[in-house]
Amino acid sequence: MNLAAALPESLSGGTDLSDRRPDPASRSAASVLVPSVPGQSSAPVPSTHTREISTPAAARAGRSAAAITGAVRALSGAAAEAVTPQSRRDRLRTETSSSPESAAMLTSDRLLAVNRRTKPPPRGAWNSFVFSATLHLVNLGDSAKVRAHKELDDRIRKEFDGGTRFVPILTRKGGVGKTTVTALLGMALADAREDRIIAVDANPDRGTLSERVTKQTRSTVRDVVTKAASIGGFTDFSALVSRDATRLDILASDTDPLLSEAFDEDDYNVVADLAARYYSIMLTDCGTGIVHSVMRATLQRADSIVIVSGGSVDEARLASETLTWLEANGYGALVRNAIVALNTATQGTNLVKLEEIESHFRSRVRGIVRIPWDPQLAAGSVISFDDLKPITRLAARTLAAMVVEGLPADRTV
């Protein structure tokens, strides 16, 4: 039976609704089929729609509550699902939610009617040309390339609740581009996201992460440790880091090898605790000493890891042995959630079958991303993210999206 038929005559008031034409969406959602009964016709009940009736509040409250309760009980299971929406997308337009909505539900897509004035101009060479040539009468929307870029942005911009996410970048082999991958990943994250991203150089063997951006300070992780008690806010902390054009903050390691070697597990925890106050994601450029105490503290905090492999036989084997060591030491979950960044700019790449390397790692980790050769990266100096080759930026953004997808969205601190 339908809801309107179940209401008492006092509420329906004999209102003539024939002069109002329901829209197709309302008509399809409101139509309810009555189960067939022996001796009666099984024709579908005509579609109906609601209309607000102004009655005194006191009299209306009791009658409407009883009438609606009886009508809902009379509905079949399928009809109840049709009128009891589970989400904003499933509900009819203007229908009231059964639970309070957050302010985030008031989106432009929901509130603005799509027309010539509200639909944004298209992006993409040909689509923009058509839009201009037709005096804004024909809007083809964004090109496929622009839509793909926006979809990747949406993946990278995944929101987090419940504290900072920690992502170490590591491998047992030096010289495979681990520091470069850390910088690329951080820049891709910072360029697309609105929150703060930091990359910390925790390499005890004199790391070079800070050399990938223009230095704005000579401070290092050692300064953060010694000044930890006096750091009272983000302004104090930001004075100890360098920031590039993408808004990626980089905290350098000590240049003195003796001081670098002295950077231990306790020092790393001090830096990580401070970074957790101000940043949503902390990347850690780890050294090759996988049994160093800093590595233990790094892995204990890790939400996901990135393993960097070169394109030669020994580089791929050592990257795989890194995964084996992690599994043997109780980090099997991190291995299964790991991403392998395959740096194809290393020596020997042209002599090996990269597909076979990828096939091997695909059996052990969640995903693989190839990092192509780029003249700017090969220089080993300051990286300008906007000046990288398009295919290199795409690889960095793809790596960022895959890493973010493996991070927990909600976590209790």
Image (cartoon, rainbow, N blue to C red):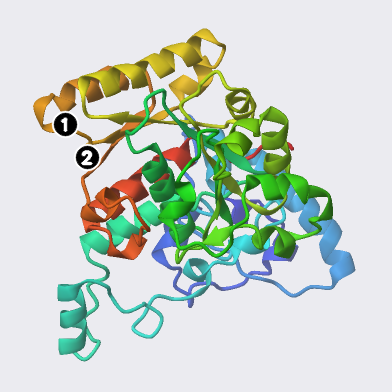
Counting other residues with Cα less than 10 Å from the Cα at mark 1, is it few (<14), some (14-19), or many (20 or more)? some
Residue 179 sits above or below residue 301 on the image: below
**Residue type marked 2:** Ala
93 lies left or right of 14: left
Q: Residue at x 43, y 61 (%)?
A: 25
Q: Residue at x 73, y 31 (%)?
A: 266
Q: Which residue is mark 2?
A: 345
21 lies left or right of 221: left
Instruction: For the C terminus, give its image quadrant.
Output: top right
Residue 151 horizontal/vertical position (percent): 36, 54
Counting other residues with Cα less than 10 Å from the Cα at mark 2, is it few (<14), some (14-19), or many (20 or more)? many
Residue 303 horizontal/vertical position (percent): 57, 32
Residue 299 quadrant? top right
Residue 252 horizontal/vertical position (percent): 55, 49
Q: Which mark is residue 96?
A: none
| Furthest-left residue in this view | 351
| Furthest-top residue in this view | 328
> Do callouts 2 and 1 mark residues in contact (Cβ within 8 Å)?
yes
Q: Secondary structure at mark 2?
A: loop
Q: Which mark is residue 349?
A: 1
Residue 280 horizontal/vertical position (percent): 61, 49
Residue 292 versus residue 161: which sits nearer the camera? 292
